[in-house]
Image (cartoon, rainbow, N blue to C red):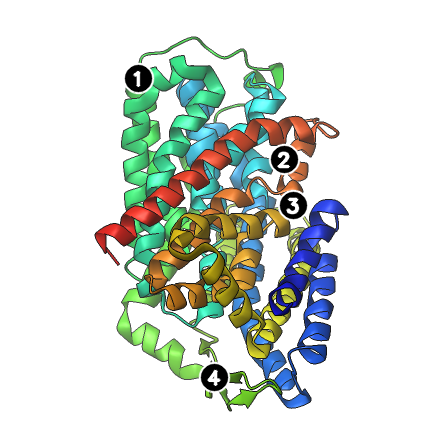
Amino acid sequence: MAFLLASLPILVILGLMIGKRWGASRAGGAGYLTALAVAVGYFGAGPRLLAYAHAKALFLTLDVLLIVWAAFLLYRVADEAGAIETIGRALPGLTADRGMQALLLAWAFASFLQGVGGFGVPVAVTAPLLVGLGFSPLTAVVAPSVGHAWAVSFGSLATSFQALMAATGLPGTLLAPPTATFLGLSGLLVGLMVAHTAGGWEAVKRLWPTVLVMGAVMGGTQYLLATHHLWNIGALGGGLAGLLVGVLLAMRQPAAAPSPASPAAESAPRPDNRTLFIALSGYLALVVITLTVQLVHPVRAFLESLLVIQVPFPAVKTARGFVTPAGLGRKIPLFRHAGAVLFYSAVVAYLFYRRAGWYRPGALKRIAGGTVRRVMGSSVGIASMVAMAMVMQHAGMTETLARGLADAVGRAYPLVAPWVGALGAFMTGSNTNSNVVFAALQQRTADLLGYSVAVILAAQSSGGALASVFAPTKVVVGASTTGMAGREGDVMAALGKYILLLVALVSVLTVAALAVGLW
């Protein structure tokens, strides 16, 4: 009975989002109210406990949303200037090989876009470009959907990885190595899948050496950045490195069958080097500012000294005897926060593009308005799910679920852990939300079973990242950009076989990592 009631908020979200097609904000609100009712009515959560649970939820939400808002602001600054379109136009002219075009646009460029924007941006930007190059609308949606999946955890300037840290209270230095390893290895399979979508097994046989080189560079770059406190530019750096290497390989590769480009694509001029450099300047500013804040100690210390939010919380206890121990809340250095770094970068990028004359009148208003409209719904969904997760955690509901799963699955849990993250991302449309809802549960279950918490949480975030692109909400956005509205079922059928294989790979990697004892 206790396990069923504890799982009720999650089942409510799952049912409403999949069965009723509700958005994350509405379903998250319903899940939160369900958690509140169950916590009070069955688990004995009193007013004092709920007050502190909501206070913690407020700070955790702030921690995550600072990044969400600033990341999309930076994307809008570049998009309004035409920088994203300029970068996209520069790539197809490098090669007539359909498979190589797909690797450049649907894998490397989509991963770069996930690094800086996320929120459905990779597919929305690259799918029309692929259609213009002669790819079918179905392939144009499926290829970038698969192609950027490996970059989700450290994409959107590490929003979902930040949520993983915030939800568990564990440092990124502990969580980054296994997470980056799982996703980097998954990225190699992702590259082969993108080649397969573009040209079948013939393209896979022809391009596997290229995939191996690009994948090693992208995964290796992301790993190095993520494990050296630079996780917020992990996917960005990996995607950018992949683009650079991919361009070099494309220029040296003999042409295969050219793709039948549309008239629109043929008439679009390829940007010159100066124009391309200006387009990239906003993201180069992000890299420089991030490295400066992270690696130059006087700058880092000065920003940390300005304003830090950290609140102590007392121990609280339910009427049934479950105790949440006292401790400090999450530390938020506002001026050195990842969201602040993104905001500084957005300001510098705006100044670059404005000086270059790339903005039309009213650009600033459109940037601000577009940012608010795009992330407001996501913000409400994140806030409600964070509140739900904190109520469940403080009421002992997460503990009940963890013990139930540990008893039911036992030693096979490492195989299941990635699928829990995948389920969360599928039902919420977001790896961030999946980490908020399930990370504490996975952490506690790993503790109870004696498994490495870092490895199980890496499985959670990796499974969620790979499955997030399969979420109905993401598929609808992608289908709408290529004229496939109403054919979302076709997209999900084509996409599903790739995503299931990727999550299964993470299950194998999780078992292997625990067997070897790497982390």
Which numbered dot is residue 478? 2
The residue closer to the viewer here, 67 or 485, is: 485
Which-is-in-front pick, marks 1 and 3? 1
Q: Position of residue 458 (x, y in %)?
A: 39, 55
Q: Position of residue 324 (x, y in %)?
A: 50, 83
Q: Quadrant for residue 380, please give it.
A: bottom right
Distance from Cα at disc 3 to Cα at disc 4: 42 Å
Disc 2 packing (10 Å; few <14; some 14–19; many ≥20): many
Does the CB distance between marks 3 and 4 fall below 8 Å? no
Q: Residue at x 41, y 59 (%)?
A: 457
Q: Which residue is mark 1?
A: 253
Q: Secondary structure at mark 1?
A: loop
The residue closer to the viewer here, 145 or 508, is: 508
Among numbered discs 3 and 4, the one appearing first in the sequence: 4
Among numbered discs 2 and 4, the one appearing first in the sequence: 4
Q: Secondary structure at mark 2?
A: helix
Does the CB distance between marks 1 and 4 fall below 8 Å? no
Disc 4 packing (10 Å; few <14; some 14–19; many ≥20): few
Q: In the rendered view, does 172 fall on the left or right side of 341?
A: left
Q: In the rendered view, does 450 fall on the left or right side of 483?
A: left
Q: In the rendered view, does 106 fall on the left or right side of 32?
A: left
Q: Secondary structure at mark 4?
A: loop
